[in-house]
């Protein structure tokens, strides 16, 4: 009973503190992750007041790690990565190498062991997926060429981190007396198990998991679908650890990868992963509980040096690589500054390092402080990226002109074509989609009928399977960069979709359809600019046909249409 009470107190206290401080940092236009880390400090053992159970918090955080890695696998799009591979692959590798080397230098100055400095260097070389996507989305850059490059770059960092998580226990946790041959054999065995896990997951998983999700989806039960996705995430993670001796994080990543390549990726992300967010909050809270202000006071020079690596060294390396590969200054600075932070993967690596006994407490303190400061500063730096790009570009042009080179012509800015999201693909949605495509506009269709989505994708139309009331689905459809939303699926969820879309993109023009006149007021209140109703259109059509039969002129017909319109809409608010 005391254990159960400790669990409830830890869960309630941690989430309550995270809610309060997360809300406060959000209102201050900072990342909520900062609030979650501060909440961990508040309920940790080094500050007065309520103290959460660290052991229980770590166990709950383990679920958060599994679901985080599953989410990374879900969002891993091979096509997007291949599209930016010529820049993202060399860029990510060089930037990781530079940041790791600088981290090793900082660690050696602090007097840590070589193993500790390598883990520390890798930990600060990788950025936070959560922070990067949030910053890009809030700045309406996520669905631009620069955004795609940054996401592809981060995906490579994530894959690299997964490999490190697999190999690190073998390299630093093995028998020190085994020698080079023993370590090589252990490493070979680990890689063999890894290959077996990957093969099993993709050969068996691709046959079983999509069929299972499809069978459950046909039941129409949202709860069962959510439960199925969670069972897949946790089941593959536990299975990878028990059957292949691998990390649960890797198994979760592979499980997410299989689901992400199926037709259920968007729906799985939107309906099942809110649970991920709740447990991920506990993960950040558990990390914040590590911070000891007293110990940090003695290691502030190391923390300052680490911040310099994350805020200056990493972005400069990324900017240099992107510019060397002949990409625009705006793209280079957008990618470089978006990577100037650390987050969840840094802590996952640090946690593993502590479990293996190679990561000193001082390094953990430095990572927590660096994360809080870099996550806080990153959106502010990203806001001035274009100014920095213009200043740097003009500086290079002036130097080139003074050297007699005449200067290089600036690359044209990235231009976004007109973007439209169509919700629903019934007769109305089908007609509007055809009209848009005939006028040179490629729409994105959001539809809950999987067969329809497959048919549209086969015709070359971008289609997303999922519920448009979910923020994740609208985000994947590109609503933040869209010019207009056409809501053609008349139903009770119209106001929820419109309100969600308007909250993500305040400049969005929304044309909505409704069955009944009584629905107009709710849709307008939610943010629709124009609402077309079935009842009104029937009244207009019948009025017009009757007047034409009675011999009315075109002017009389139009005047009567306006009269009918005013009567109908005034009567229904």
Image: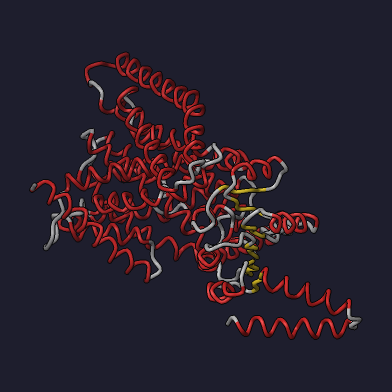
* Residue 388 visible at all: no
Judged left or right of residue 234, residue 416 is right
Q: Which residue is drawn at 58% across and 82% down?
A: 573
Number of dots carrying numbers:
0
Q: Where is residue 518 in the image (x, y as percent from the top left)?
A: 57, 75
Q: Residue at x 35, y 55 (%)?
A: 307
Q: Which of 530 and 29 is in front in this view?
A: 530
Judged left or right of residue 351, residue 402 is right
Q: Residue at x 80, y 55 (%)?
A: 438
For this orientation, the residue located farthest to the left is 2
- Image colouring: secondary structure
* Residue 340 visible at all: yes
Q: Position of residue 136 (x, y in %)?
A: 51, 58
Q: Where is residue 73 in the image (x, y as percent from the top left)?
A: 46, 39
Q: Residue at x 28, y 34 (%)?
A: 114
Q: Where is residue 502 in the image (x, y as percent from the top left)?
A: 54, 68
Quadrant assignment, res 519: bottom right
Quadrant assignment, res 200: top left
Residue 172 drawn above or below residue 186: below
Judged left or right of residue 110, residue 464 is right
């Amino acid at each position: 009973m005391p254990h159960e009470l400790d669990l409830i107190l830890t869960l309630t206290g941690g989430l309550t503190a995270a809610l309060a401080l997360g809300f406060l940092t959000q209102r201050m236009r900072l990342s909520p992750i900062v609030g979650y880390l501060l909440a961990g400090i508040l309920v940790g053992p080094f500050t007065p007041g309520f103290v959460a159970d660290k052991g229980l918090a770590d166990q709950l955080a383990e679920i958060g790690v599994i679901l985080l890695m599953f989410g990374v696998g879900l969002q891993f799009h091979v096509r997007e990565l291949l599209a930016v591979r010529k820049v993202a692959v060399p860029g990510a590798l060089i930037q990781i190498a530079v940041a790791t080397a600088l981290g090793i230098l900082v660690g050696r100055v602090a007097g840590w062991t070589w193993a500790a400095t390598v883990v520390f260097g890798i930990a600060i070389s990788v950025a936070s997926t959560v922070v990067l996507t949030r910053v890009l989305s809030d700045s309406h850059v996520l669905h631009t060429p620069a955004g795609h490059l940054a996401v592809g770059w981060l995906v490579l960092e994530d894959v690299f981190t997964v490999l490190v998580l697999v190999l690190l226990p073998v390299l630093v946790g093995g028998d020190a007396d085994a020698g080079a041959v023993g370590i090589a054999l252990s490493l070979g065995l680990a890689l063999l198990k890894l290959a077996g896990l990957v093969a099993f997951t993709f050969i068996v998983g691709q046959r079983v998991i999509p069929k299972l999700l499809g069978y459950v989806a046909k039941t129409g039960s949202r709860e069962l679908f959510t439960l199925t996705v969670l069972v897949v995430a946790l089941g593959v993670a536990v299975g990878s650890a028990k059957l292949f001796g691998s990390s649960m994080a890797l198994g979760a990543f592979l499980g997410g990868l299989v689901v992400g390549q199926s037709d259920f990726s968007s729906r799985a992300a939107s309906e099942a992963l809110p649970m991920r967010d709740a447990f991920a909050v506990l993960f950040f809270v558990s990390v914040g509980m590590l911070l000891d202000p007293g110990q940090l006071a003695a290691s502030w020079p190391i923390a300052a040096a680490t911040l310099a690596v994350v805020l200056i060294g990493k972005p400069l390396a990324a900017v240099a690589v992107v510019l060397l590969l002949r990409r625009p200054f705006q793209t280079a600075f957008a990618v470089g500054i978006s990577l100037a932070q650390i987050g969840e993967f840094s802590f996952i690596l640090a946690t593993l390092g502590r479990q293996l006994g190679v990561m000193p407490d001082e390094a953990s303190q430095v990572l927590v402080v660096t994360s809080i400061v870099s996550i806080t500063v990153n959106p502010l730096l990203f806001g001035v990226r274009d100014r920095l790009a213009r200043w740097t570009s003009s500086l290079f042009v002036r130097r080139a002109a003074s050297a007699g080179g005449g200067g290089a012509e600036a690359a044209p800015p990235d231009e976004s074509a007109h973007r439209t999201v169509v919700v629903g693909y019934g007769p109305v949605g089908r007609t509007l989609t055809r009209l848009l495509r005939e006028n040179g506009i490629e729409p994105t269709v959001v539809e809950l009928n999987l067969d329809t989505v497959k048919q549209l994708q086969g015709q070359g139309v971008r289609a997303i399977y999922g519920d448009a009331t979910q923020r994740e689905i609208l985000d994947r459809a590109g609503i933040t960069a869209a010019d207009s939303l056409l809501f053609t699926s008349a139903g009770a969820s119209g106001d929820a979709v419109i309100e969600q879309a308007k909250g993500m993109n305040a400049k969005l023009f929304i044309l909505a359809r409704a069955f009944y006149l009584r629905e107009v007021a709710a849709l307008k209140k939610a943010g629709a600019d124009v609402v077309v109703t079935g009842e009104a259109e029937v009244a207009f059509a019948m009025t017009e046909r009757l007047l034409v039969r009675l011999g009315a002129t075109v002017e009389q017909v139009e005047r009567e249409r306006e009269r009918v319109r005013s009567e109908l809409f005034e009567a229904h608010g």
